[in-house]
Each structure stands twice: as structure tokens, then as C-alpha cells.
Amino acid sequence: MRTLRAVGFDLDGTLFDHRGSARDGVHHFLRSLGVEPSPGALRSWFTAEDTQFERWRAGEISFQEQRRQRLRAVLPVLGVTLPTDDAGLDALFDRYLQAYRQSWRAFPDSRALIHSLRASGYRVGLFTNGAQAQQLDKLHRTDLFDGFDTVCISEHLGVQKPDPQAFAILATRLGVAPEECLFVGDHQAHDVDGARSAGMRGLLVDRYATHTAGIADVVLGELRAGVEPAR
């Protein structure tokens, strides 16, 4: 087994509480439209988010179009009349984004974990699928950015998880071989399987079920299963 010298993280759902932030944001957004954010309405919103974001990730539609498609899939069923032009849809989605952004938060243990890993001698990096400006904004607003040795965002790099090249880029920027890196994420296919296909160790975490109390113990346990990092 190669010595683990670095840890890579996913962002949304792993270090950043996307689901909680988005849930609060969509509550405010729907109420601003005169719609009650019922459990059914919230399920429809997040189903559309997952479906359309995956279409963007697969290269079927643009990032902005996946946002428009989310509105088209959800709001008419809830009785909301949509603008007929793209500019109007974009302005409407911006109202959601404002509410979402006001609700942004990292998970309580995220900042302490990444700083403690660096203090212990590990290189620490991030690879996130998403838009460059928004993901950087999340990192700065949640005070996570300065905890990383490198930050990789798919829109800027032109490659997305689970492509093995994404993890190879992360390893190169961390200055380690893929076999020397543990990657931590909340998506089996995108994060864990992708990392393993590139030669990394992959660790699946679930912030909303198994690991509601935090992920530090499981990350450190995975690292202890290898060799201590070089000092």
C-alpha cells in the first residue's frame, strides 16, 4: 500500500451543506411566488435539480439551460406562469439564487477538519463539478477557501468527475501520485468510483444519514488504515 500523503474532497454535500442551503432557499423562493413549499413541491424541485444538473454534466445542455429547465419542470405544475423568453427565466432563477446564496453554510466540522489535516502533514485539495464563479463564491463565503492547497472546478478545467482525468489533475496539483491520495465525497459513482478508477482510494460519506455528527472520524480512520504521512 502506498503512503497516503493527500486528501481530496468533493464540495456540495461533503463539506458544504447544499441540501440544507437549497431547502431554505427554495422555501423563500416559492413563498415569494405565492406557492406553499409543501413536501411534494420540494421533492419536485430537487428531482428536477438532480435530473437537469446531470444533463449539464453529461454535456447535453448548457449550465444556464439546466436552470431554465428546472423552472419549466416544476413551476407550471404549481400554478406559476413562466416568462416566455430566456432572459425572463434567467431573471426568475436569479431570485432563487439570491435566496439560496443567503442560506449558504458549510457543515460545522468542515473547516476544522481540512485545517487539521494540513497541520498533520497532509496535502489537501478540492475537486467540484460546477460553475467556477459560484463554487468559488461558496468557498469564500463559508470561509473554506484558504484551507486548501489547491482548488479544482470542472467548468474551469473542462473535465468533470467521474472522469479519471479529473482526479489525475487533482493529484498532479497536490504533488502526489493518485495512489497516495484519498478522495472523500458523497456520490458513489462521481466521487468514489471515479477516484478508484484513477488509482485513488475513495471514501463515501453521507452527511444526511450515516454521518450527521461529522465526517472527521471516518476520514481519519481511513487515513490510519494506511501509513502515516511523511513529515
Image (tube, grey):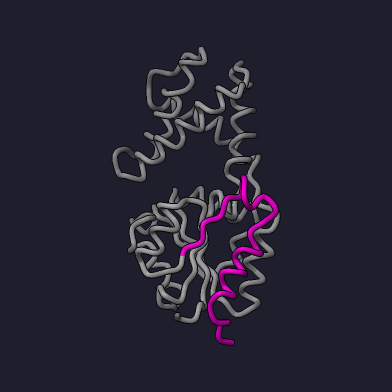
Whether residue 1 sits left or right of residue 168 in the image: it is: right
Tell me the quarter of the picture where residue 99 sits. Answer: top right
Q: How many marks?
A: 0
- x and y percent of residue 225 in the render? 56, 74
Image quarter where the N terminus lies is bottom left
Above/below status of 77 relative to 91: above
- x and y percent of residue 96 in the render? 56, 31
Q: Residue at x 53, y 77 (%)?
A: 226
Above/below status of 228 relative to 187: below
Q: Residue furthest bottom?
A: 231
Tell me the quarter of the picture where residue 28 sits. Answer: top right
Q: Which residues are magenta?
A: 202-231
- Magenta span has 179? no
- x and y percent of residue 57 in the render? 36, 45
- x and y percent of residue 7 in the render? 53, 69
> Which residue is nearer to you in this view: 85 or 70?
70
